[in-house]
Image (spheres, rainbow, N blue to C red):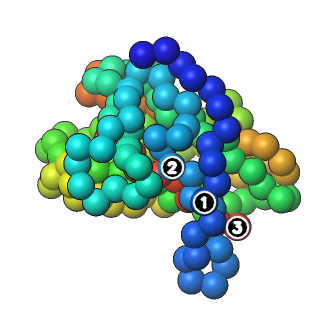
Amino acid sequence: MGIGFYRSPQVPWATGGQGAVRYEAENAAISRGVAESNHARFSGTGFVNYDNAAGSYVQWTVNAAAAGAATLRLRYANGTTTGRPMDIAVNGTTAAAGVAFDGTGAWTTWQTRTLTVNLNAGTNTVRATATTAGGGPNVDYIEIQR
């Protein structure tokens, strides 16, 4: 599958006091993966199923009113018993290497991984790249909260 770059729609999502902004994976730029909707309990219109290949990725365009630390939550499912680690990069720089995305028990069982990342004021890119031949887990969305 080719790479299609376009802005990820923003969906405001309340998460206990200060809002978060949700960016659906199926609306992001996808390299070596596909948007699907065949496993239940996802949000939006689907999720991204990474190809079983190192280097496959999903890249979101996110906006920040000001520079600084932000909480990034990535919702995923991994129906295998093998972890599917990914590198998380912000604006082309690795923010977290080899982040574990362990098995969730089923492709319909979604979990959330939380990280702290630094964003620039304005437009930023967040990329989740598979680091092993097994590819990444299925990814539903990221949420950014300041």
Numbered disc 1: secondary structure: strand
Tell me which corner region of the image, top left, top right, bottom left or bottom right, holds residue 1.
Answer: top left
Most extreme residue toward the top, as rendered?
Answer: 2
For disc 1, the neighbor class at 10 Å (few under 14, some 14 to 19, many from 20) is few
Q: Position of residue 125 (x, y in %)?
A: 68, 38
Q: Which residue is mark 1?
A: 11
Q: Residues within 10 Å of mark 2 (few under 14, many from 20)?
A: many
Residue in the picture at 55% in, 31% down: 29
At x 37%, y 46%, the residue is 46
Do the CB atoms of the residues marked 1 and 3 lie less than 8 Å apart? no
Q: What is the number of the mark on residue 146?
A: 3
| Horizontal side of residue 112 vs 16, given as left or right | left
Indicate the quadrant where residue 105 lies.
bottom left
* Image quarter in which the C terminus is found: bottom right
The residue lying at 46 percent from left, 41 percent from top is 26
As helix, strand or loop, the secondary structure at mark 2 comes to strand
Q: Earlier in the sequence, mark 3 or mark 2?
A: 2
Name the mark nearer the viewer: 1 or 3. Answer: 1
Q: Is residue 100 visible?
A: no
Neighbours of disc 3 within 10 Å: few (<14), some (14-19), many (20+): some
What mark, if any, has residue 86 been given in the picture? none
